[in-house]
Amino acid sequence: MESLFKLFHLENIHPILVHFPIALSILYAVLELIPFRKLRDNLFTTKAILVILGTISIFASKQAGEVAALAYQDPAILKIINLHELFAKLSLIIFSLIFIFYLVQLSQKVKPKLFKSKTGKLCHLISSNPFILITLAVLGLISVSLTGAFGGMIVWGPQNDPFTTFTYFLFFK
């Protein structure tokens, strides 16, 4: 029974929440990177749902991670935690931008008159440009992957898998 209560301490929520942004964000990025524009456009609603839920889950996971980070005192692990937090923030920024772009596109479908102003036209131009979304999706995919690699280093150590070992070598050797 004690282990059940321990599960619901705030520092233990982060490992539970963290898998949602990883899965949702990576799936979104993969769908955004489909090379056929028509197929990519047909998946608009799916991608919008993934990026909205993924961004919300990144925010929730980041908040829980800040509480979990307080449990560590080892300077070597704190260096990894700092990079983990940096890439988590970067992921949140990137996917928040994509989130905004999708909200602009969704609102244009509902209220096209919103885009008659110069600001509205600029927002539409940016949000409908596949190059910008694809670039952000690639940067988001890299950022989420590095966040996960640093998280894996914190929990399992730097030699856990080939990607984690490579990432550790890039940043610490």
Image: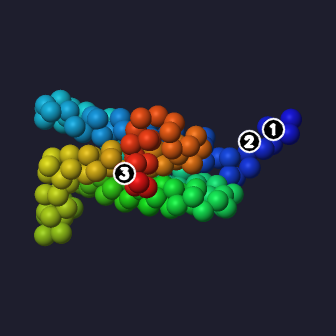
Q: Say the numbered circle drawn on residue 170.
A: 3
Going by the numbered disc 2, the residue's amino acid type is Leu
Q: Residue at x 29, y 35 (%)?
A: 30
In the depicted structure, whether residue 66 falls above or below residue 117: above
For marks 1 and 2, give the CA distance: 6 Å
In the depicted structure, whether residue 124 falls above or below residue 151: below
Determine crowd level at label 1: few under 14, some 14-19, many 20+ residues with C-alpha closer than 10 A.
few
Residue denoted by label 2: 7
Quarter of the picture holding the C terminus: bottom left
Going by the numbered disc 3, the residue's amino acid type is Leu
Quarter of the picture holding the N terminus: top right
Residue nearest the viewer, comparing 159 with 44 = 159
Residue denoted by label 1: 3
For marks 1 and 3, give the CA distance: 37 Å
Indicate the colouring scheme: rainbow
Residue nearest the viewer, comparing 172 with 116 = 172
